[in-house]
Amino acid sequence: MLKTTKESTGIDALLGQNTSFNGTLAFDGIVRIDGNFEGKIKTNDTLVIAEYGKVSADVEAGVVKIMGEFNGTIIAKTKIEMFKPALVQGKLSTPSIRMEEGVIFNGTTEMSNLTQSKGVPSPIKEPPKN
């Protein structure tokens, strides 16, 4: 018997493989997207874009894990993880990033607040203000 309760999967909500959604998604907990999503996503928790998921969005999250397709911007407070066969296009901003071999990434990354959070002075000096 296959269990799909939160206790067995840890997932609070699921957008299934044959589902499409356009709009704004705000949630607590873990949400997994296996279908198509377009819009905005906001959470302090975890977003999982599964292997068959296709997401085009502006995302603000604590943690983002990508195995499917993503196009847009991500601001992750904790980390972004990309696993094969992910296809990621866009702008990523996070203090920690992990990219598995085989992931395709086209875009930019910004490791925001990484040096400040570790108490290490930044080696980049700001230009003098006139």
Image (spheres, grey):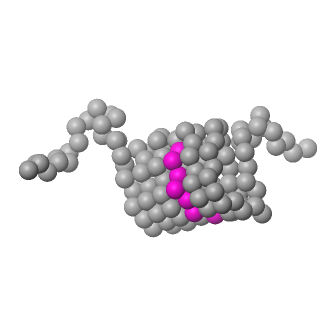
Give residue 4's quadrant in the image: top right
Can residue 67 be seen here? The reply is no
x, y (%) of residue 5? 81, 39
**Residue drawn at the location 68% of the way across and 50% of the way down:** 32
The image position of residue 59, as x and y in percent, is 53, 52
Which secondary structure class fits the magenta region best?
strand
Please determine whether, in this image, residue 15 is positioned above or below residue 122.
below
The span shown in magenta is 54-61
The residue sitting at 68% across, 63% down in the picture is 36
Q: Quadrant of the N terminus?
A: top right
Instruction: Give the x, y percent position of residue 94.
Output: 43, 47
**Is 21 on the left-hand or right-hand side of 103?**
right
Number of numbered discs overlaid on the protein picture: 0
Q: In which quarter of the image is residue 27?
A: top right
Can residue 130 be spotted in the picture? yes
Q: Give 2 or 26, whichever is nearer the viewer.
A: 26
The image shows residue 70, relative to residue 46, as above or below, that is below
Q: Is residue 53 left or right of residue 106?
A: right
